[in-house]
Image: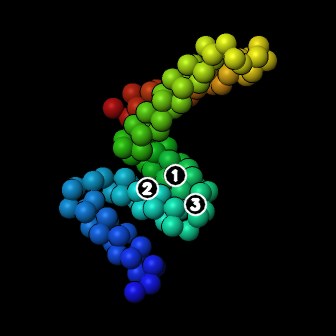
Amino acid sequence: MSENYGTNQNLRASLLDWVNLGKNPTEIILKTAKLLSEISGEESYYQNIYEQIFAVYGLALDDKFILEKELKEVEERLKKISAACENPEFTEDERKRMIFAIERHKAEIERLKKMQDEKN
């Protein structure tokens, strides 16, 4: 049997497992896209799918799953950037850039929370 056969079987088994576990359909699409991205070696494939799903399902169609996922990801990035900003190994210029990123992340968190509040 070829390596592709095993990979395809693993993908098929994972997909069936996610359905049987009652995973959110949007989550299933994202997990499938992630696996396809890994299989193909095209890291940008997942990112493109995610951005499109966020725009269409999260922003346009108010899908709570994708909005919550995006909010959690932005909050996690904010924590990492904030912690890095405290590292004395970085220069003042690097910290200024991190502070700018922190402010942008905070603004994005507020925007996403406002969108969630408006949807409820």
Q: Amino acid at mark 3?
A: Tyr
Mark 2, other Cα within 10 Å: few <14 / some 14–19 / many ≥20:
some
Residue that badge 3 annotates: 45
> Residue 69: percent from the left, percent from the top?
42, 40
> Residue 77: percent from the left, percent from the top?
53, 30
**Who's the residue at 27% across and 53% down the image?**
23
| Badge number at residue 50 | 1
Against 17, residue 119 (above or below) is above
**Who's the residue at 60% across and 62% down the image?**
42
Whether residue 31 sits left or right of residue 104 in the image: it is: left
Which quadrant would residue 31 be assigned to in this image?
bottom left
Cα gap from disc 1 to disc 3, whole angstroms: 9 Å
Cα gap from disc 1 to disc 2, whole angstroms: 7 Å
Which quadrant would residue 19 be assigned to in this image?
bottom left
The reply to whether dot 1 and dot 3 touch (C-beta < 8 Å) is no
Mark 1, other Cα within 10 Å: few <14 / some 14–19 / many ≥20:
some
**Between 112 and 84, which is closer to the camera in this rendering?**
84
> Residue 110: percent from the left, percent from the top?
51, 23
